[in-house]
Amino acid sequence: MGNRWSGMFWSLLFLAVPVLGVATFAVAPSYDIWLPKDVSEHGRSIDSLFYFILGLTGIVFIVTEVLVFWFLWKYDGARTKAPATFIHGSHALEVVWTIIPAATLLFLAIYQMNTWADVKMRRPRIAPTVEVVARQFEWRLRYPGRDGELGTPDDIFLVNDLHVPVDEDILVQLKSMDVLHSFFLPNLRIKQDAVPGMKIPVWFKATEIGQYDIVCAELCGWGHYKMKGRITVESREDFDRWLAEMEARQEATQPEADATAAEVAAVP
Amino acid sequence: MSTVQAPHAPSSPAVVTPRTGQSLSTFLSTYVFSKDHKVIGLQFLFSTLLWFLIGGLLALAVRWQIAWPWSQVPVLGKLFAQEGGQMSPEFYTMLFTMHATVMIFLVIIPILAGAFGNFLIPLMIGADDMAFPTLNMLSYWFMWPAFIAFGASFFVEGGAASSGWTSYPPLTTNVASSPGSGWGQTLWLLGLTLVGVSSMLGSVNYMTTIILMRAPGMTMFRLPMTIWAMFITAILQAFALPVLTAAGFMQLTDRLLGTGFFTPEGNVVNNLATSTGGGHPLLWQHLFWFYSHPAVYIMILPAMGMVSDILTTFARKPLFGYRPMVYSIAGIAGLGFIVWGHHMFISGMNPALGITFMVSTMMIALPSAVKTFNWLGTLWGGRIQFTTAMLFAVSFVSMFIIGGLSGIFMAATPVDIFIHDTYFIVAHFHYVLFAGTAMGVWAGIYYWFPKMFGRLMNETWGKVHFFLTFLFLNGTFFTMHILGAVGFPRRLADAYHYETFHHLQPLNAFMTWCAIGMVATQIIFAVNFVWSMFYGPVAGRNPWNANTLEWTAPSPPGHGNFDFQPVVHRGPYEFSVPGCEKDHLMQTDPPDAHSAALAAAH
């Protein structure tokens, strides 16, 4: 079946997989199609885990794909005179290629536990900096005001415009009013679903002043795509000044603020 | 084996002609309400290929919006002209919901179990039919109400379901929360239940048939990998499906009767408070993934089995590590029941529980790795024949490596925080389901087509089909990995207004062009398929010189399959036995033929 050229052609096609695959990953960062800039403290360990897995899987990818190519090339029936090797397997090989991946995977599993615990299990012992209540299709925010306590009359209500001080532990209390949403801060390596009926703590420490996106990452209805917020990371002084300004503005429009307050406060 | 057909001489080609003097009722019982597993298999095949086309077109519409948001949609635009030919965001959510629904429930699952399972199981184990032919017929006809439910849902008020194929409540249980949450979602749940009934009827039948109806000499460890995979898939179906069915009914009563299984206290949607409470949205996710994670293995294991058989035939070599291959399928199936939580790492589920699921998920990569190494071992030292079926089978291996490795990123919980619900996961499951399973299905079609229709498909056009599909699929899906690395979220009708994603439109446009090319390429396949049914070269019983039992039957086999009683003397992969003049020993070849040679070789 087929002549000598066809086997070579198809083998080379399969060689193109690792070549172009690696090339895609190599070129992507220079077009800025890569991990967005990390501005969080814990993000470093997430990114380094990403690179570690990329390296590890990259090696396996290249080796196995090159073997596919090499076996197709070398054992092409149209070009080889030797009969096929009559072999049903090899116990030794099976043991080797079971134990090595098993050990690697187990190592990977244990290696990452600490990062996960840092991001999702070791909550800083502080009062919530802000409460985020997701609803179709906006992020309702509530700052505790001067008394530092949520649920008191001096709470400050805002929409989509999250501000946090830089280099401080931030604890967000995440809730949802209606359906599932997901609080996704790409630059802060944070993603957490907002679930109606649950109060979920989310914490991070932003390390760089600037403005970044808040994206909804869990389908929440027709307007899912436009459920956009912004997070502003700023110095402590700027943050305090901004919060005071927001408070003053809220005082000026008391009735509206009261209506929002009642709605947000009703969310369990 | 229950009954044995009158023994014809094996050499005389059996001509399959419907009995003469047939009435409408014989026509109906032969071709429509047939109880013959082969006809039922082909009915599944034709139906699922048609839905494959619909699912592909839905995908193109999705891709159009991602590449050129809010632009005039060609062709389809006229259908929803109220937006001036533009796609509305709710229409977009409906599109990707139904693309996934159609592809998973109406294409992949039924084409593997329904079409190939039905056609191949009795033939490959040497049985004259399934254990329960009537049940088998019903398993196909239960698909039709499902086809109608899913199909009709496009035309009801509010459109078809639009809350994602995962149907997460409260979006699905609260009718006020989305337009497709009306009749569309109800029909979706009904359709899903009916597909489940069909799968369940099939799976009971497959298990019974494989356990009880193997030909004399066909021990479990002489079964071809295809049958092992079908067998374990059937077990997975039987244990996992009841949970989905129950969950589906709970969601249905939540919607219709207000039971509130998935609705928490104080839920307010669209400024309307819900009257019930006391439920939890995460309950649905647990129940849904308890089925749907095993289901992803239901969607790949049969393809793995078929690819194993095809690789050995065209490498002219025994399968490397038969038993490890069987054990790793069983391992995947077993572990498959305790990894569902990896879909829920950031769902709000207890993070400590997340660690448990992370460890089991890491470990499930192991049997997949073992399978990959054994496939490589099978290619090593072969005499490879580059047929179209072989090219698709090799590409299954090559692409499954990508899909398997990218899974490790998601299994790593901290990395999953960033890439969850981004295009990274979209890349991952398309590499497993399209570049894996669909390529395996094409390998299966090119390979067993001569058995199905007695004629071979055109090889040249088959290779053109392979080449273009392979090229375009990588153009479409490989790029999704780097898109996911940016964090580009899935299911957004337009993400370019975010600062993080605004520069990604050109890449998406490239991917859409590739997707258009990929769908267009399938015209070549469709023409080749139909043309070859009637005009392809006559195949004979065993065009590939393969070993398994189906190749001893006439092509196509008549009702009752074999014109002699197959008796099995050896395993399915005795290729290139030293000392034999032909390079393959069929499972039915008499034991004395080459016993000395075999004994010497072992």
Image (spheres, rainbow, N blue to C red):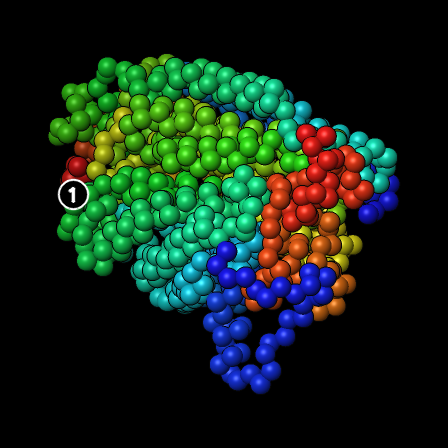
Q: Tag 1's secondary structure?
A: loop
- Which of the image's four quarters has the C terminus of chain B? top right
Q: Which residue is mark 1?
A: B278
Numbered label tally: 1
Looking at the image, the residue that sits furthest to the left is: A153
**Percent of width and height locating residue B8:** 65, 65
Residue A251 drawn above or below residue B113: above
**Percent of width and height locating residue B204:** 40, 53
Q: Nearer the viewer, residue B9 or B316?
A: B9
| Residue in the image at 42% along x and 65% along y | B134
| Residue in the image at 73% along x and 44% along y | B593
> To which quarter of the image does residue A31 belong?
top right
Q: Is residue A134 visible?
A: no
**Percent of width and height locating residue B515:** 62, 50
Amino acid type, mark 1: Gly
Q: Nearer the viewer, residue B552 or A150?
A: B552
| Residue in the image at 46% along x and 32% along y | B331
Q: Is residue B354 left or right of residue B264?
A: right
**Percent of width and height locating residue B28:** 50, 77
Residue A55 drawn above or below residue A7: above
Circle 1 chain: B
Label 1 Cα neighbours within 10 Å, binned few <14 / some 14-19 / many ≥20: few
Residue A160 drawn above or below residue B71: above
Q: Nearer the viewer, residue A59 or B590?
A: B590
